Image: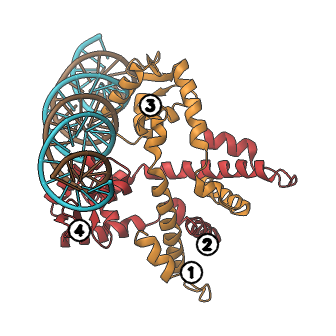
Chain colours: A red, B orange, C cyan, D brown
Amino acid sequence: MNGLGESHSEQAGRPPEARAQGAEEAEVGLAQQAWTLLFELLHTHMRNFPALAAEFDLSPVQAHVLRQLGEGALAMSTLATYLSCDASNVTGLVDRLEARKLVERRSSEQDRRVKMLVLTEAGAELRGRLMARMALPPPFIASMPEEDLLALGDIMRRALKPQ
Amino acid sequence: MNGLGESHSEQAGRPPEARAQGAEEAEVGLAQQAWTLLFELLHTHMRNFPALAAEFDLSPVQAHVLRQLGEGALAMSTLATYLSCDASNVTGLVDRLEARKLVERRSSEQDRRVKMLVLTEAGAELRGRLMARMALPPPFIASMPEEDLLALGDIMRRALKPQ
DNA sequence: CGTCAAAGGTTGAGGGTGTCAATTGTTTAT
DNA sequence: ATAAACAATTGACACCCTCAACCTTTGACG
């Protein structure tokens, strides 16, 4: 349907594990294959993230910000790092969220340069609903057989552990 | 590290498959767990897609457009559907790509309302390099053991097949 | 055949997202 | 005490995105 995932998955199928000596090269192929498939699915799904955010009258980025503002307060520069964007961008972002009373700036005691971000009552409540909504698995996950779900969960946990 | 994935994976671990009668409810839990982990990893990785696109002097969306313009020509409205955005947005998008001689509008013979998009020589060349770059698996994939890669590939292929 | 609704694409207004360069205020090192 | 580094902001500029309005072409129907 798109060009890359198709041709690869059709033509290559799965490299025969018969020749086990070239483990290095085979691994690269496997990784690329798995990654291309994952990427495909991911991009397909991420396409409706804006719509999901819109359910809460949020832009995608605003949803992302609320997501990061989990527990404690966060410095604006820290948020910029998390979003991997310029600090000047965060200013406007927070301006709009603060205008909607979802977030508060409060100056830090220790360092009067930094401003800490905290969720308001309304912000925390909205974040709760947002997170619950995001946790709803999309169809391609929801319709997986149980064993695949278990395997997928295990693999992902392993991938998260070291890094 | 983020709030959701952590608490769930730590506290719940994995629901015991001992009580097998409540298969419905258990499945929901598993799906949500796997999805949350996947979502975590995904969003973490997608964060540097803009940087990847920038390696080719493209915005993220422009990269996405080039990606869709794989083989044949595409009507603008079709592209809008693929991008799940408004048609008027595509106009500007294509304007900028056309200004850079990566894409051409050409009126359809059958229906003079529609304009078909085709890659120029330069556009196809750039797309080739872009696709190759995108296929490079990120660290969290590249460092997976072979068996996980195989399992992941199989699961993803199954997930893509029906839908 | 003439009319009219529907579809493809464009335009203009308006707002969010993002970068860079320059500025202000604060901290830290020398 | 002075200079360098840092946090946040501002202004200029470009891109992404939606909506409503518009124009042209098409296809259907009386």
The numbered mark, 1 or 3, whose residue comes first in the sequence reads 1
Identity, as a three-letter code, of the amino acid under mark 3: Asp
Query: Viewer-nearest of labels 3 and 2?
Result: 3
Instruction: Say which residue label 4 marks.
Output: A118
Identity, as a three-letter code, of the amino acid under mark 2: Leu
The numbered mark, 4 or 2, whose residue comes first in the sequence reads 4
- What chain does badge 1 belong to? B
> What is the CA distance from the residue labelled 2 to the residue labelled 1?
9 Å
Q: Are marks 4 and 3 in contact (CB under 8 Å)?
A: no
Q: Which quadrant: the N terminus of chain B?
A: bottom left
Callout 1: helix, strand or loop?
loop
> What is the CA distance from the residue labelled 4 to the residue labelled 1?
33 Å
Identity, as a three-letter code, of the amino acid under mark 4: Val
Query: Viewer-nearest of labels 4 and 1?
Result: 4
Quadrant assignment, res B127: top right
- What chain does badge 2 belong to? A
The front one of A52 and A94 is A94
Q: Residue furthest bottom?
A: B19
Question: Which numbered marker is on residue A150?
Answer: 2
Q: Are marks 2 and 1 in contact (CB under 8 Å)?
A: yes
> Residue at image x 47%, y 22%?
B102
Q: Do tags 4 and 3 sit on the same chain?
A: no
Instruction: Say which residue label 1 marks.
Output: B14
**Mark 1 burial class by Cα count in 10 Å: few <14, some 14-19, many 20+:** some
